[in-house]
Image (spheres, rainbow, N blue to C red):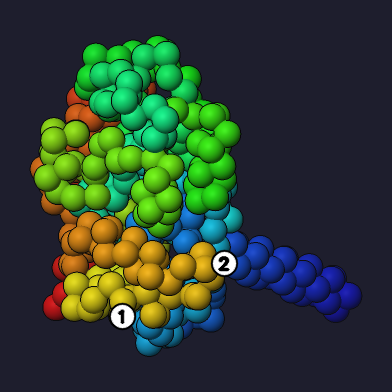
Amino acid sequence: MPSTTVRASAAALAALTALSCLSACRGSRAGGDAGSGGTVKIMVGGIDKVIYLPAKLTERLGYFKEQGLDVRLLTEPAGAQAENVLISGDVQAVVGFYDHSIHLQTKGKCVQSVVQMADVPGEAEMVAASKAGELTSPAAFKGKKLGVTSPGSSTDFITRALAVRNGVKTSDYTTVKAGAGQTFISTMDNGGIDAGMTTDPTIAKLVSTGKAKVMVEMRTEEGTRAALGGLYPSSSLYMDCAYVKSHGETVQKLANAFVKTLGWIKAHQPAEIAAKMPADYAGGDPKLYEKAIGDSAGMFNGDGVMKPDAAENVLKVLAQFSPEVGEMKDRIDLSKTYTTQFVTKAKQ
């Protein structure tokens, strides 16, 4: 009888140990709540892009640590790749474009923007200087080679939107994966693309060297409304809905940190912002980097709040060219794609 009891106790202990290990492994993968010692991994869709500047700036200002957070910033060159890493569960959050939240809902995935950093794309359609005479607007996209960071990225989404809104089918032009930064510039130099969608500091470098001109300006509210019929919320901190629900304390602390950074951006000049960023982000030209920040910093809204009508416009724009979104437009629940709960509390 005693031996049976010992065996039963041993078995129970083994089961408890295995359960604890499984729970710990899951906690390690999903990221523990603040105060539990877990690391929050955030994938940024191009950490040196000005449109995603708040991610690194928050780290440099010490606001993550101020909230008691252990944040690890990772980077992928395109938002589509960052999105995939979130879905696989390898990171807890993404700093990327809000439109992915809508597009993913058509695939049965639920992700939410918890901090909406910008109301406009912060991008521009750039046309190679040698093509500027013939390619003056998206209406002339037909037969052209157009660069995007990667297929399925927000630069791809907006390029398709510009085409359709100007009477050009998405099948009428060639989409080229041109990446960003020097890769994008080299692709344009080599004639691999006639025009392409990109962000600062790439825009600033192309203009300053005379290699390209701005065809469609979407770094400003005026330009965005003209190009897309309304605001188009872009840079955001988005997460899996289940994580938002189960890790509210961590999400709140992240929101606190990011909202504080957005306020800091509004209160400081481009030179002061540039000085806080890693020196290598300037690409050897600090003054040009400062200008790039000055040209794009106005895109950041200062409070992290999503405007409902702006979210509705993103849905409307996506439905114009995306068969998946178009078919499900009336069934997409925008309330599941963003929340203002955490930024509202952060402001208080």
Which of the marked residues, 1 or 2, is nearer the chain's N terminus? 2
Q: Residue at position x 32%, y 54% from top?
A: 235
To which quarter of the image does residue 5 belong? Answer: bottom right
321 horizontally vs 308: left or right: right
Q: Mark 1 points at which residue?
A: 272
SS label for mark 2: helix
Task: Name the mark on residue 27.
Answer: 2
175 horizontally vs 98: left or right: right
To which quarter of the image does residue 139 belong? Answer: top left
- The answer to whether 91 is drawn above or below residue 145 in the figure is below
| Disc 1 to disc 2, C-alpha distance | 38 Å
Task: Name the mark on residue 102.
Answer: none
Q: Which amino acid does label 2 sit on?
A: Gly
Mark 2 surroundings: few (<14), some (14-19) or many (≥20) residues within 10 A = some
Q: What residue type is labelled 1?
A: Glu
Q: Residue at position x 50%, y 51% from top?
A: 181
Rendered-image quadrant of the N terminus: bottom right
Question: Which residue is more in the foreground, 178 or 236?
Answer: 178
Residue 75, percent across and down?
54, 58
Residue 273, percent across and down?
32, 76
77 horizontally vs 61: left or right: right
